[in-house]
Image (cartoon, helix red, strand yellow):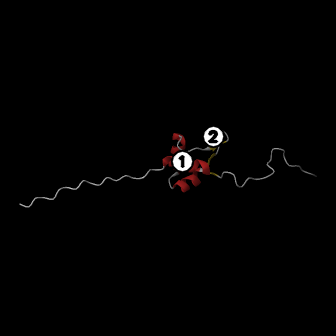
Amino acid sequence: MNTTQSPTAPTTVDIDGPRYHDLREVAAILKCSVRTVRRLLADGRLGYSQEKKGGVIRVSDDDIAAYYQASRIGPRITHRPSRRPARAAA
């Protein structure tokens, strides 16, 4: 019995394309909890992909990189305290 490949099945796999992670992997990458990742997704601060509503949520490497870029804290500016004049000798 001969079988043929489905016309919708991919003939090649693109291993250089974007990599997708589940929520636990994203939490490990961002060093936070899964609950925090869910909050970031709900707030729209972290992009994600989902095939259908209620389906599995996947976050790409590009989405994680964009989150890091958007949440990056700029250089910290420290103000030097003004020097007080020396006390006059009594």
Residue shown at 57%/52% (left/top)? 26
Is 53 placed above or below 2 here?
above
Report crowding for label 2: few under 14, some 14 to 19, many 20 or more residues within 10 A (C-alpha): few
Identity of the residue drawn at 84% across and 44% down: 7
Amino acid type, residue under disc 2 in the picture: Gly
Q: Closer to the camera, 27 or 45?
A: 45
Q: Position of residue 20 (x, y in %)?
A: 64, 51
First in residue order: circle 1 vs circle 2: 2
Secondary element under disc 2, as helix, strand or loop, is loop
Foreground of the two, 87 or 42 = 87
Q: Using the rendered image of the protein, determine whether residue 60 is visible from the camera's viewpoint.
A: no
Q: Is residue 39 left or right of residue 4?
A: left
Q: Helix, strand or loop at disc 1?
A: helix
Q: Which residue is mark 1?
A: 67
Percent coordinates x, y for residue 38 in the rendering:
53, 45
Residue at 48 percent across and 50 percent down: it is 72
Q: CA distance from mark 1 to mark 2?
A: 23 Å
- Disc 1 residue type (three-letter): Tyr
User: Which image quarter: residue 87?
Assistant: bottom left
In percent of width and height, residue 78 lies at 34, 53
- According to the picture, the residue beneath numbered tag 2 turns out to be 54
Nearer to us of marks 1 and 2 is: 1
Splitting the image into 4 quarters, where does residue 41 fall? top right
Q: Residue at x 54, y 53 (%)?
A: 27
Q: Where residue 75 sits: x, y (%)?
A: 42, 52
